[in-house]
Amino acid sequence: MRVLVTAGPTREYLDDVRYLSNASSGKMGYAIVRAGLELGWDMVLVSGIVDLRPPSGCEFHSVVTTEEMRNASVELFGSCDGVIATAAVCDYKPKERVTGKISKTGDPVQLEMIETDDVLAELGAKKQKRWVVGFALEAQNPRENALQKLRRKNCDLIVLNHPSAIGADSNSVELINASGETEQSWSGSKTEISKELIQWLAKRVV
Ligand code: CTP
Ligand code: CA
């Protein structure tokens, strides 16, 4: 079993020094990689910049922007049996990246933003026999929105969690299948939840 995991935030630069991002710590993805390694799986980690050491024994690919995460993930997915997408991808990027540094003028600034590549949707569209597990971070109508995401991105399963999980050590999640049924609910540390998820997948997908 060889599994791709995307983790952490991506950054989108306005100029050479300023960027948009989010507070993702990468803890969930790194815990999933450790849980997979413990089961003897080959784990391939594509991670945005986080303050964590890559688990020893995994194949580690460091990326910064969404485009880099997309390129690395699409290439590596070909040699994997499945993907677990925990990354908190920066959803928008400035339409143009300025070379150098934008100077302040004292006036308000307007930025034109466009959507970034959807890494998981592209992997879902290319999955063929591979399995695809997404994460969904929902503030409103959590189950409906998570199921819509599962379908839009052609996932087999989606792990629903709440914005309070961002950066935290613990989490409370629901594993939802393609029929919209809750297969499992887990609460606890991200390490505990990761072990439960990997053990559940090991019974279903191996
Ligand atoms: N994802 C991705 N590429 C993106 C956006 C999201 O691969 N550009 C993945 C995330 O890693 C996660 C899933 O898609 O596995 C859902 O991410 P989420 O942020 O909850 O959903 P979005 O589709 O980005 O929609 P929104 O943020 O508007 O709710
Ligand atoms: Ca998003």
Image (cartoon, rainbow, N blue to C red):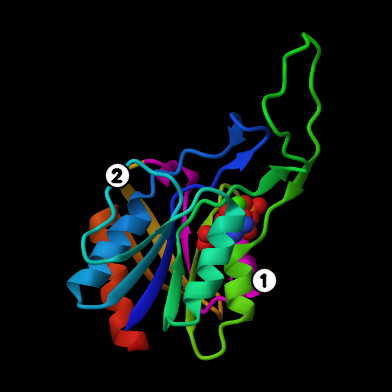
Question: Depth check: 130 or 44 in front?
Answer: 44
Q: Does 80 sit left or right of 188 as displayed? A: right
Q: Which structural element holds mark 1?
A: helix
Q: Which structural element holds mark 2?
A: loop
Tell me, yes or no, if residue 68 can be seen here. Answer: yes
Would you say the beta carbon of the disc 1 residue lies within 8 angstroms of ligand 1?
A: yes
Which x, y percent locates residue 150? 58, 71
Would you say the beta carbon of the disc 2 residue lies within 8 angstroms of ligand 1?
A: no
Which x, y percent locates residue 196? 27, 68
Check the picture and name the quadrant holding the C terminus: bottom left
User: Label 2: few (<14), some or many (≥20) within 10 Å?
Assistant: few
The label number, if any, that marks residue 152 in the structure image:
1
Q: Does 179 sit left or right of 200 as displayed? A: right
Which x, y percent locates residue 83? 45, 73
Question: Depth check: 161 or 144 in front?
Answer: 161
Residue found 31% across the figure and 63% down from its top: 32
* Amino acid at pointer 2: Asp
Magenta segment range? 141-167
Q: As displayed, is residue 108 above or below residue 183?
A: above
Q: Gap between marks 1 and 2, in whole Å?
A: 29 Å
Instruction: Find disc 2 in the rendering and name its residue.
Output: 169
Q: Is residue 144 magenta?
A: yes
Residue found 51% across the figure and 91% down from its top: 129
Question: Depth check: 180 or 62 in front?
Answer: 62
Residue found 60% across the figure and 49% down from its top: 140
* Amino acid at pointer 1: Arg
